[in-house]
Image: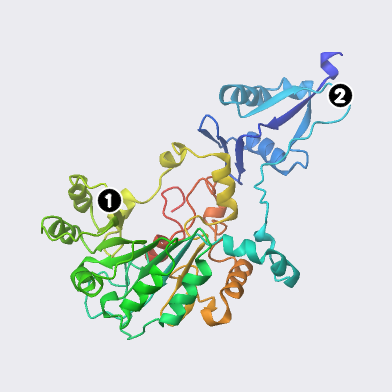
Amino acid sequence: MNNKNRELWLSINPFVHLETKKDATLLYNTLSKKAVVIKDKKMIAVFQRIHTSERGGFVISQQEYESDLFQKLNNLFRKYHFGKIYTINQQKEPFVFRNELFFEKNLFDYSGDKNFTAYHSKDLFEEMLQVNVYVTSYCENTCSVCHMAAKQSLFCYSDNSTSFMSCESFHNIMQMLYHQDGVINILGGDISKYPRLDRVMAIISAFPQKSVNLFLNSTILESTMNAISSLIPPNLSFVLLFNSVKEYKTFIHSNQIPMIIIKKRIVLVFSESDLLEMKSCDDAFVMVIPIYDGSNIGFFEQFVYINEKDLQDKKMSLEDILINKKMNVNNYGIINVFPDGTVKTNFNNRSLGNLSEGLENLLWREMKRKDGWMKTRTEKPCSECVYQYLCPPPSNYEIAIGKPNLCTIKP
């Protein structure tokens, strides 16, 4: 064939993530973990054409191939293995499959169809990865972080009520989740004030194959242990919560650490000095959680916010990126059940309803709303950013700070 008349096929490699916006295009090689942002308008137009092509690419002529634009593009492809430009040896154009995440049981398609719910009922329960059960919201302590911490992370809280979950409701939750793989976390309030704590321990013991975590604030540890010390089931582990670095250090040096299975110690930090103090602690069980208190935005901008270098250095698989398009990994599979039976997918979200309506009905309501488990970065300014799905999904920090994103790229 005369080279002057030959046609060539241009396409992106299937392991490359392409995100193209009005003023920029991102190419991310999920094998080499190399990212390049293109801001040349002519090249952006080429990538937009690829992005909208039904066949995943398009044909160019030999003359186009020899132009400066496509030579520059070909050099970029070869250097970073982003794509290919090659001669078409057959009459039909090639076809490149788009990068999509396919689910064996695609619950994301639900829009209210009753036949769909009947067919996928069992599948839905299998999606529950974590159930946070708040057995009480009653607490007489006046911790400065109360409620503020719970809105940003998994933590105890009080709403000044004397609300307690019934033992029957707690038993029903354990029974519903007994054959599921999800984690069960129990929180308060002041759990030591729960009137039938012995009954709760007995219910947990009745489901020995189900691991349960009890979240206890250090301020109520002693009173809670006095109430349950002889009743602790073997399938119960403890997560200790510390309101500050000072409280954590006091506890560690107190020589009063109880002989219980401690799965984790969660310590709240509010400043750079808190982080530096915790760095000196040699504790394999500790987890540090930053908390926004209304006055430490500088701390968050320095240690929590994401910048462009963070994202370009990020090591993500193609699956990670596609999951970010479909679901919110911070929220997915999590439900919160409050003392009065109210159910939410996120502490800050609107209620799905009450447990008395049936957990399955509430979960289908969430699958239809898509504002918790499937809340992704589809709103401005994230929807206009090429890093839209390299970024972590929306979190409770954005809600606490009052911003749609926590980054320096599109502040």
Q: Position of residue 391 (x, y in %)?
A: 48, 48
Identified by mark 1, the residue type is Phe
Taking the spot 76% from the left edge, 27% from the top edge, the residue there is 9
The residue pinned by badge 1 equals 285
Residue at the top extreme, as displayed: 2
Left or right of residue 198: residue 111: right
Taking the spot 85% from the left edge, 19% from the top edge, the residue there is 5
Residue 47 against residue 247 in the figure, above or below? above
Residue at the right extreme, as displayed: 91
Nearer to me, 80 or 239: 239
Nearer to me, 230 or 250: 230
Q: Position of residue 159 (x, y in %)?
A: 33, 80
Nearer to me, 394 or 37: 394
Taking the spot 56% from the left edge, 26% from the top edge, the residue there is 80
Q: Position of residue 394 (x, y in %)?
A: 48, 58
Tag shown at residue 13: none
- Can residue 239 be seen in this snapshot? yes
Looking at the rendered structure, the number of numbered marks drawn on it comes to 2
Q: Residues within 10 Å of mark 1 (few under 14, many from 20)?
A: few
Tag shown at residue 90: 2
